[in-house]
Image: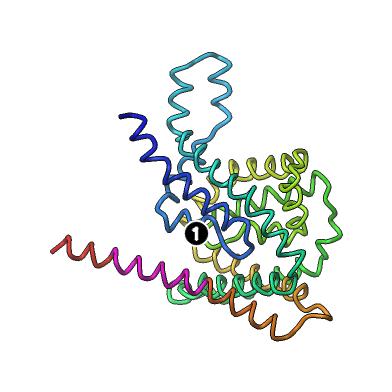
Amino acid sequence: MQIRSFFAEYIPVFVKGILMGICDIIPGVSGGTVAFISGIYGRLISAVAHVSPLIIYDLLKWDLPAFRARLLQMDVVFLFVLLAGIGSAFLIASRIMLWFLEEYPVLTNGFFFGLILASSVLLFAPLPHRYKGGYIFLILGIILGLFIVMLNPAALGHSYPVLFITGFIALCAMILPGISGAYITLLMNQYEYMLHAIKILNLPDISAYLAGGVLGILTFTRLLKYLLKYYHDLIVAVLTGIMLGSSKLLLDRALEPAASGSELIISVIAGILVVARRFDMEFRNNLLKSFLKLKKNE
């Protein structure tokens, strides 16, 4: 009976992890959004926020009651199953995405550009009604995004420190609804390199990236909870601007000399429609939930 209840609870978590992993590997689509829509975002943030190095201290002291209590606070089974789903998706989807980038670079980068464009609009659209300074911080974010592109990320190379810093920033972004960690990786010029590293299981490079990501998540989650609580709209406005400004990098990649204008337009429209479809589904789900809540109150 316990095994049945275990599978009943955690198979959906594994499936949600797979969906998060697929989204996390596509620039412009956020795994954090999937966690938010599927109802596990709060549990994920809470679990990560409770991860503490003190658990090692408890184990060294052999304080088993304290060790078990910290494991329960961390929701360790939930985290393990979710990460297993995300990791499985990474191993499969990385090969597919690398093939698209190699065989159809114009269509793929154009599609990514459409995703970023539409995601940015949907992220920012609700803000001006609540936050009057939204446009100011959006423009500041756009300027910062353009500045990042002008710095020529290709010159960074692929050293372990660069992979560590990229992982630190990208995995923090992955837990933000609407912000794409894969896009941060692409912006740092590590996207295709990391896809290839996952494909051939280059463990040193993967470890450097993940080490930065784990440290970023452990240190950033608490700050994230604070920022989203007190400065939510300001943070979203700046991040949206950065996404829009830095999307010039994708457009430059798609506008190759041999690129067909019709191919680029079709791929950009396809990216926009994917996000629009996702938004339509979210809207319908929220509408249905509101209706059911209203009926229940009656």
Residue 274 rendering spot, x and y as whole percentages:
53, 72
Q: Is residue 250 above or below residue 189?
A: below
Residue 36 rendering spot, x and y as whole percentages:
45, 56
Residue located at (76% from left, 55% from top): 190
10 Å neighbourhood of mark 1: few (<14), some, or many (≥20)?
A: many
Q: Residue furthest left?
A: 298
Q: Is residue 203 above or below residue 103?
A: above
Looking at the image, residue 61 sits to the left or right of residue 247; the answer is left
Q: Is residue 119 magenta?
A: no
Return the residue at label 1: 33
Q: Secondary structure at mark 1?
A: helix
Residue located at (70% from left, 64% from top): 100
Of helix, strand and loop, which mostly describes the magenta segment? helix
Looking at the image, residue 233 sits to the left or right of residue 109; the answer is left
Residue 208 rendering spot, x and y as whole percentages:
74, 41
Highlighted range, magenta: 275-289
Looking at the image, residue 294 sits to the left or right of residue 46; the answer is left
Q: Is residue 278 magenta?
A: yes
Q: Is residue 169 above or below residue 237?
A: above
Where is the C terminus found, in terms of image quarters? bottom left
Residue 221 rendering spot, x and y as whole percentages:
54, 46
Q: Which amino acid type is marked by label 1?
A: Thr
Q: Is residue 9 above or below residue 115?
A: above
Looking at the image, residue 134 sits to the left or right of residue 146; the answer is left
